[in-house]
Amino acid sequence: MIYDKLVAEVEKHVPVRKEEFELFVEKLEVKKLKKKEIWETDNSISQYMGFVNEGILRQYYIKDGNEFTDAFYTENDFTGNYISFLSQQPSPTITVALEPCELLVMPFAELGKLSAKIPSVEKFSKIIGDQKLFELNNRSGSLLMDTPEERYQKFIEQKPDLIHRIPQYLIAQYLGIRPESLSRIRKRHLKK
């Protein structure tokens, strides 16, 4: 079933009652993206949350013509710029498919209405919001405090499957280092 991964992810955090989940699913749409297709663009207000059923999304900024990778979203991740939606300010990021993707999407406005009606949706939304805040805090702390080697080690521990699914130059961008530096770090890591 198309919702199996979503059900499994939700059930990790809150019990799922069939009738409540059916109300939730009614508001979901399946969105398929081709490789390199943009899901969210900069300078527009984000309207949707998405659950990655299949594939990888890359979120990045552009400054002075240069791209800066901020995040990768893979299977079982939630994506969408909720801050843009809440503030009604354009998102500064672009989110694009790195490989063919299947997303389950819902407007943030609908999610808010469901949260008001269904306590488990509200609880789960808060849990995911807290997780995203935690991830953001860890990422910014790592960029400030960790060495490039430490950032690489954390990356491969947290998402080992991505090493072979994402081009190395994008991993280097995400880690805040040059591709040549990543190559040296990988060689040292392989010797260990």
Image (spheres, grey):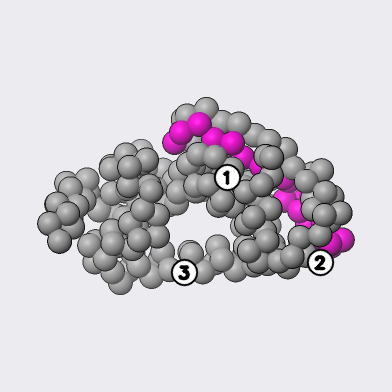
Where disc 1 sits, the SS reads strand
C-alpha distance separating marks 2 and 3 = 27 Å
The total of numbered circles placed on residues is 3
**Relative vertical location of residue 95 with respect to residue 146 in this rendering, above or below:** above
Residue 64 in magenta stretch: no
- The residue at 18%/57% (across/down) is 189
* Residue at mark 2: 119
Residue 170, image x and y in percent?
A: 33, 43
Viewer-side residue, 146 vs 4 = 4
Task: State which tag comes first along the sequence, 2 or 3.
Answer: 2
* Residue at mark 3: 137
Q: Amino acid at mark 2?
A: Pro
Pointer 1 with pointer 2, Cβ within 8 A? no
Residue 187, image x and y in percent?
A: 14, 52
- The residue at 26%/66% (across/down) is 150
Residue 118 in magenta stretch: yes
Task: State which tag comes first along the sequence, 3 or 1.
Answer: 1
Where disc 3 sits, the SS reads helix
Residue 40, image x and y in percent?
A: 57, 40
Where disc 2 sits, the SS reads helix
Residue 116, image x and y in percent?
A: 84, 62
Q: Which residues are magenta?
A: 98-119
- The residue at 47%/29% (across/down) is 35
Q: Amino acid at mark 1?
A: Val
* Residue at mark 1: 52
